[in-house]
Amino acid sequence: MWAELLPVGRSAASGGYRRHAWNGADAECRAWFEQQARDRGLHYELDRNGNQWAWLGDPQGTGAIVTGSHLDSVPDGGAFDGPLGVVSSFAALDELRGRGARFAKPLAIVNFGDEEGARFGVACIGSRLAAGVLAPEQAVELRDADGVRLPDAMERAGYDPTAIGADRDRLARIGAFVELHVEQGRYLAEDQPVGVASAIWPHGRWRFDFHGEANHAGTTWLDDRRDPMLTYANTVLAARKKARLAGALATFGKIAVEPNGTNAIASLVRGWLDSRAADEATLTELVEQIHQAAAERGERDGVKVELTRESYTPVVDFDVPLRDRIAATLHGAPVLPTGAGHDAGILASAVPTAMLFVRNPSGVSHSPAEHAELPDCLAGVSALADVLEDLACQ
């Protein structure tokens, strides 16, 4: 399975993956998922938001145990973020069948769509829609960098965008959701190969618009300029400093410039801030401080600064009884928090959820250098199989 997925959406230039929602690579991944389901005799279906489900047992039954993750990627992302969870879910089912496990509850494997938000700017769109966290009227207004609307992209890919929305009946039939994921850090590097998540830090995405004045780079004196790039650059440095002081994280990883000419002073710079902290109060104060620093610098530069919050996920504490049960099943596996967002975090408000992490020796993620060793991946499969056997089998 892993070998079949490796070439899909991989850039020959960077070695990273460009599996973005509703594009060709995404379609190949979806076809792969459907084939894996059918090869195992599972009941395959799409939900109203384009998420894929593979069922063992009655899809309409109650108390279902669900596992899975996502198959899309960030721009030039690594091979493990998302796909490791989906591949491991199918492999864990194979292992359970090999053990002769007798299932007492329906079991499902899911591929949530557009988890990374690489194309439309909002993470976990598939699970957000299903959980009712993202309203359909908001989703239909999302556009990619080329101006393509989310509904149009879905329709071009052969899906019905008029059906999107909360899927509460489906979620009500789920007894627990367990997501396996490569660790996006290295807390496990010196410990065990598999860990259990305790919580997800609150996090969000904010767009800073820096409005200046376009002018000629070769004829406009420095003192006569209203250059938004200066304000943006100062804001990036301020964000780093204030995040360090707060013990939090702040990253400007995406930028758009108008008119984007080498010999032109920009009229507009847009910068997207990703920020995360251990608690919501710290995160709120940090973003306010970054905004204040941007506004103060903008006043000096003659630049207007506007701030728009594009997405936000509050702190997620995973279901404690489920977490403790899983840790006990895995003989005291380490329990650790994470600063990365996941579909499991979105579903936590509606369904008891938990996560398993597989060791990442370097801690690198969202990069072609992301890696997990084969023995650790196999340990993850066995751990997931043990958890599913405890939750779903007699």
Image (cartoon, rainbow, N blue to C red):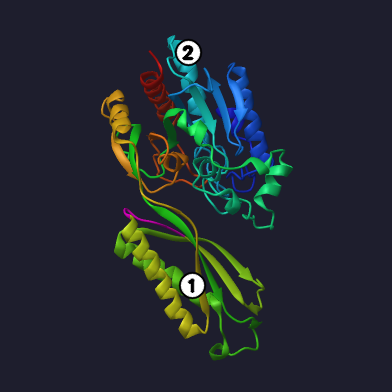
Residue 249 percent across, percent down from the top left: 38, 58
Q: Is residue 145 above or below residue 86?
A: below
| Crowd tier of the residue under label 1, counting other residues whose Cα lies within 10 Å: few below 14, some 14–19, many 20 or above | few
Residue at image point 28% right, 34% down: 334
For residue 154, above or below residue 229: above
Q: Position of residue 127 (x, y in %)?
A: 51, 41
Residue behind mark 2: 97
Mark 2 to mark 1 CA distance (whole Å): 56 Å
Tell me where the magenta segment starts and ends, as one range.
Answer: 274-279
For this rendering, which residue is in front, 263 or 281? 281
| Amino acid at circle 2 | Arg
Determine the secondary structure under disc 2.
helix
Q: Is residue 267 above or below residue 139?
A: below
Residue picked out by circle 1 = 233
Give the left or right position of residue 152, taking residue 211 as reference: right
Amino acid type for the residue under numbered disc 1: Ala
Q: Decide which of tag 2 and tag 1 comes sooner along the chain.
A: 2
- Residue 244, how many percent across, how many down? 33, 63
Residue visible at 39% across and 51% down in the picture: 314
Which quarter of the figure has residue 251? bottom left
| Residue 292 location, quadrant | bottom left
- Going by the image, does 347 lie left or right of 24? left
